[in-house]
Image (tube, helix red, strand yellow):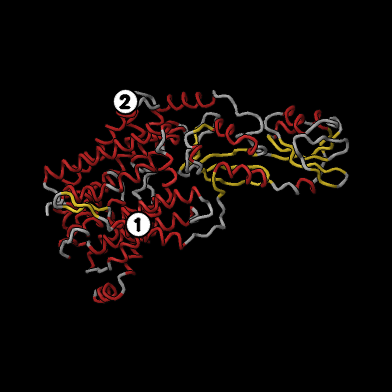
Amino acid sequence: MDTVRWIITTAPEIFLLLAVAIGTILGRVRIRGFAVGTTACILIVSVLLGQLGHFAFPALLRVTLFSLFVFTIGYRSGPEFFASLSVRTLAQVAVALVLGGTGLVIVLLFARAFSLDPGTASGIAAGALTQSSVIGTASGALAQLGLSKDLLSQQEANIAAGYAVTYVLGYILTLLFVPFVAPKLMRIDLKAEAKKLEAELAGGDPPKTENLSYRKFQARAYRVTAGAGRTVKSIEEEIGSRTVVERIVRRGADVEPHLETVLEAGDDIVIAGRTAVIVAARPIIGTEIDADEILKAVPGNVIEVLVDNRHLHGLSIQDIAARVGADARGVFLRGLTRMSREVPLSADTRVYVGDVMTLVGSTRHIERAAKSIGQILRSGDRTDIAFLAAGIAAGLLAGLVSFRIGGVALTLGGGGGALIAGLVCGWLRSRKPTLGAMPPAAQQTLSDLGLGGFIAAIGLGNGAAAWTAIQAHGLLLVGMGLVITVVPLVVATLFAYHVLRMNPVITCGALAGAMTVDAAVTGACEVAESQTPVLGVAVPYAVGNVVLTVLGPIIVAATYSG
């Protein structure tokens, strides 16, 4: 035991990394499809390890780790958040605001009724509303109050205790509420409603010729006989289904395939489009040939494009196709993902900023179309560290600004400032793609490491006090957490369905997004036997991340009595 104490005193960072490693492994374990989650497991493991001795971590470490996490959350949500401030998505924004606002009111009512201190109130809000970032923003706000070191440590321990007790419960309740309880409140059959929505989406008119499609892409070579004397445009129109002449080889030399180019007998051409269509093009063009060389020269590609054009936010695929127009000639939409989940495709499927389109076609055509849609995601991109560091520094500086309301100084704190900076930087990146690159893999790494390290530091540094608080008030915290989770979900469900008249399937997705619980979307999709609930996730998820995160300073300001 002396050796353990010596390690704790000499190199406490070893235990911090161990807590992150063990918690992450445990968080991935699934029992009958359910996993507690990485964040909760890291906190539980760190609180238990905190019983081994006194861990002291500099405030600088915790601030840096949390700033990395919350800045990344803002950066990822920024384009989506600002784009959501439009009439087309106002209803989904309202769902997130109602849910967050109801949760805040209930937390403050409990705080007044049971004389909860700011730390406990913030902790149960973070856990019951399943938003871990509240821990950091509340801790930052508490640090601004000028509390003594011992009192500040006790408040942080209360945050950890409140979160540890209520998070798992809040997570489980959300998982159950979205697919099972919400449909009953709306008095609908989720599976039947999903089928209706799929039928509605499939009933729209297909996009116009030469625009984005959602079909398989293939290229084949033909020698022109029947099509001699006709223009490229007339050939493409007769074949239909967005078929494109990609290449023309005439007597060994390439001819630019403009729409008005006239084909000659003996030309070898490459056409691209849906397999069934181009295979049947022989009577229109001529004999299909085995021409590996000219087919290899057509640089077909599959490229992912992040949608960040705000003018496309909330438009259907058909509308986007019409808006992109001729720039989408030769480009085919193979898939659409939202928060890493496949979105059902039809002409009427709506696309939001933050979605990722999988486009297929020749490289030059895709790159041309991508300019009107968003940013091409390239695995070789490197994170712009200068942009990242400057953005976080600006956010931390903004977090120092405070406004006094009565005897309490209301401030965003470092976490809130970093969040706002992340939102702005993410939006700037969407407007100027050459600025501030941070690939998705880098975003995930910074987010996981930042939050995991911060949570581990909180748990280890306040483990003993947090365990005491859990033992003393565990049942009360559980009861309050249950109410804080369920009531906002009930209110948001009824508001969305009866007041906003939202589609019930979209409502279920919006509830999962507003609570920022990804797994609840999966549950809704499984019950619905459809991917349609994913259609309602994106906007509430972006707004929910912001709204719930800023609750930390608000709760501290409202419950601190001096």
- Quickly name the residue at label 2: 499
Between 201 and 396, the one lying in front of the other is 396
In the shown orientation, is residue 202 left or right of residue 368? left
Circle 2 packing at 10 Å, graded few (<14), some (14-19), many (20+), is few
Nearer-N-terminus badge (1/2): 1
Q: Quadrant of the N terminus?
A: bottom left
Residue 174 rendering spot, x and y as whole percentages: 32, 39
Circle 1 packing at 10 Å, graded few (<14), some (14-19), many (20+), is many
In the shown orientation, is residue 51 left or right of residue 299? left
Residue mark closest to the camera, 1 vs 2: 1
Q: Which mark is residue 38?
A: none
The residue located at (44%, 57%) in the rendering is: 445
Residue 343 rendering spot, x and y as whole percentages: 50, 36
Q: Which mark is residue 395?
A: 1
Q: Secondary structure under badge 2?
A: helix
Whether 504 is drawn above or below 258: the answer is above
Q: Quadrant of the rendered structure where residue 187 is?
A: top left
In the shown orientation, is residue 504 left or right of residue 249? left
Amino acid type at circle 2 is: Val
- Residue 32 seen from this side: no
Between 277 and 426, the one lying in front of the other is 426
